[in-house]
Amino acid sequence: MNIIRHAFCLGALLCCILQGAKAEAPIPPQLREKGMKSVFVRRTLSFPDLSQYSQGTVACTISFSDFHFGYLPDDKFYHLNKWPFSSACYKATDPDPSKPNLADGFSVNFDVKANRWVSDRSRFEAHLRAQGMDEEWVKKYADADHFYELTTRTAKGFAMTRDHVIGDESRRERHLHYCLIREPKAICGQGVMGTLKDIKKRPKTDLTPYALKILRTIEFVDADPPKVEASQQGAAASNAAARSLDRTASSP
């Protein structure tokens, strides 16, 4: 009986391993390196203080997991757009009451009680109606947003994909916006995940799964932050994200 039990357990373990392997996000075809096998590496990325050009930015250093291109040196990794974002770091402890809450422009909000970012479609719809948009277009824009919670070892935040709903259909794109906050700093950015036409025709060209996988491994490697209350985190995080994303988000 022990032999049978051990064999059963071994089979179950092997099954789980195989299922996990199948669940692994594949490399998007446009990023593949012909003839190369995936190599894992942790990379470090430093952002300069750009406050001379962009108010509220600060210097910071993060690390993240590169699951596929460990054989590439850093300069080539970034040159070949394996890091699919434009990003910067921002102050997350200097709330600016003149700035709108992030939820005014995105279907997200910070839940102070739960101490986490959550989807908030109704807040975004109210923002659109306040701009005089009719209900048909309010629904179209709200339907085009998709929320993803981000939790890493040293930060909390969100990602939001937004699909274009106007313009030449062959050129409409899916954009991903994100913020990860660990006071006193936040890293925020955005990137193009592909054209909607290509994504519909070849879903594997959508960079969203690849991008989310990277974002969920980001760690701040600066000195450990001071502890703050959840209410303070929410206010500071919303303002840091607003400072970043009001520059990168497409206005409806």
Image (spheres, helix red, strand yellow):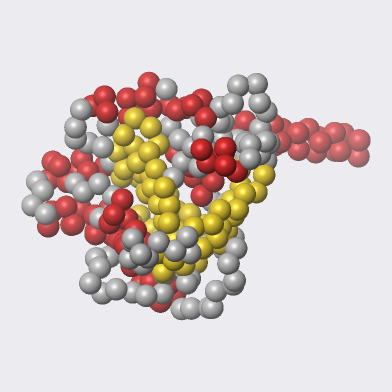
- Judging depth in this view, the residue of 79 and 223 nearest the camera is 79
Residue at the (66%, 32%) spot, across then down? 38
- Judging depth in this view, the residue of 203 and 54 nearest the camera is 54
Q: Tell me if residue 12 comes above or below residue 226 in the rendering.
A: above
User: How far across and down, in percent of the image, does residue 153 sit?
Assistant: 59, 60
Relative horizontal placement of residue 226, taking residue 246 as reference (left or right): right
Residue at the (48%, 78%) spot, across then down? 228
User: How far across and down, in percent of the image, does residue 221 sit?
Assistant: 60, 63
User: How far across and down, in percent of the image, does residue 87 sit?
Assistant: 43, 52
Relative horizontal placement of residue 56, taking residue 214 as reference (left or right): left
User: How far across and down, in percent of the image, does residue 98 sit?
Assistant: 23, 72
Residue 33 visible within the image: yes
Relative horizontal placement of residue 56, taking residue 10 as reference (left or right): left
Residue at the (45%, 28%) spot, across then down? 205
Residue 157 visible within the image: no
Q: Residue lying farthest front?
A: 52
Residue at the (51%, 63%) spot, across then down? 60
Q: Tell me if residue 77 comes above or below residue 223 in the rendering.
A: above
